[in-house]
Amino acid sequence: MRVLITLVLCSGMSIAKDRLNDNILAEVGKKEITVAEFIGRCELTTRPDNYKDKSIALNNLIIEKILASEAEKTNTLTTNAAYHARLKGIKEQAMREKLWTTVAFNKATVDTTKLKNAYRLSKREYELEFYRMHKAQAQKVKAAIDSTPGKIDDVFKSLSEFVGKQPKHKITYKDPEADTLHEALFSKPLHIGEVLGPIEIDDDDYLVMKVLNWTDYPLISGEDQQVRWNEVQKKEHTIAAWKLWKEYFAGIMHGKRIEFDKNTFLVLANWVREKYLIEQQSKALTSNKIPEIPFTANGLDLALPFFTFEGKVWTVGDFKSELMSRPLLFRTIDLDSTNFNTQFKLAVVDIIKDHCLTREAYKKSLDKGEDITRTVEMWKDSFLANNHQKNVVETALKEGKITKNDDVGILKYWESFVNDLQKEYSDSISVNVGVFKNISITKMDMVAIKPGMPYSIVVPDFPIFLSSKMINYGSPKE
């Protein structure tokens, strides 16, 4: 017969060591808190100073799971379209990231010769003079360079006449430059005076550069050499992965094109410019609160044809539905009347690209992965818990149990409510005390983001429900 050994932390939480593996830190009924979730929720978002203690952090994550469990009983969000759409969007973004890992990162390889060459060149720092230009300008420059190969310097000097000279710029191997620029500088030795480009660094964004000088900074200690070697391996592997990804993506999109209805496009672009950007400035898509649908087409005919893709006509209503889970994301923040329509078109194209990638991820059943499921559950519980707290307080206000401006009274009512729930759930809470003791978390404030992603925040806001670590629920069991 197995003996269930239960210890009790200073907070009073029951610890069932034999029920939990090293990946699961705590169980709250049927819900689990993994070690990764605990560390991520503590380290990748901000916490108030009085929530820095790791016992307080764990207590609040447990309370979040309790509140989420209570919210599931009431089903208050079953008819909230934005809630379901947000979870769907978070899941599908995670699926696209998993698709990248599956078809590109895990398959990428870099031969040793290339790694050694990259390692040698990684010690260089280049001083560059460069010109930035659009695609049309880059094509003219390339034609000029190709037609006068012996006079590249003359072509380079003439660029200032229609592009304008840019400041000098220093670049090292560790700088987060575009892969194409990185390869141009660190795949082979360059000489002073050498001209590179045009190099595509983004859509409609090109560089032509001239090497003014370079300096070699040798690595002296064995530790520094090993650190740099590891950095080079990681960087070159990532570059190789992105090459595979571009090939994979090109295959998916081959032969596909979007044809916009000109009239509807202009109507919708004008509407978005006037309404959508104002709404987005006032919204916080990163918060734990249930968001409003990020795009509403009030005053627009939802039946109007917007564009045609893969033989299907997408109406304004279809586009609105897609935006509920995949928000509109512009490639630049520098939007004005001269570039807005172009940037709006690119933003729509990006949505369709993600639509195609998501479809491929579903074909590979990536939505079934445990990592995807846990990501969705983490966000779901955060939404549910915060919504339940809001409902509890609002109900108490309506019933006259608390007064709106009585902050002390509201806090006491909330603490009493949570304490009652802790007692109710006490027997169903288990924590792996051995794992918990070995976890170290910093007290530094940091927010982890994924730039350029529709859902850029990595983890939900830290749950702030109770600042005490002496919660006194659970009891010793043998």
Image (cartoon, rainbow, N blue to C red):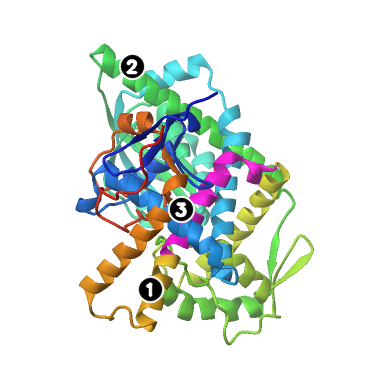
Residue 394 in picture, x, y percent from top left: 39, 77
Is 384 contained in the magenta span? yes
Residue at horizontal 38 percent and vertical 83 percent from the top: 398
Residue 116 in picture, x, y percent from top left: 43, 16
SS of the residue at dot 2? helix
* Numbered tag placed on residue 158 in the rendering: none
Q: Quadrant of the C terminus?
A: top left
Residue 294 in picture, x, y percent from top left: 51, 70
Q: Quadrant of the N terminus?
A: top right
Q: Are marks 1 and 2 in contact (CB under 8 Å)?
A: no
Write down the quadrant of residue 385 in the picture.
bottom left
Q: Residues within 10 Å of mark 2 (few under 14, many from 20)?
A: few
Along the viewing direction, whichever of 463 and 97 lies nearer the viewer: 463
Residue at horizontal 23 percent and vertical 13 percent from the top: 221
Question: In the rendered structure, which amino acid carries the disc numbered 2?
Answer: Gln
Q: Residue furthest right?
A: 311
Q: Which of pointers 2 and 3 lies earlier in the amino acid sequence? A: 2
Residue numbers of the magenta segment: 365-386
Q: Which of pointers 1 and 2 lies earlier in the amino acid sequence? A: 2
Question: In the rendered structure, which amino acid carries the disc numbered 1?
Answer: Ser
Kindly identify which residue carries mark 3: 452
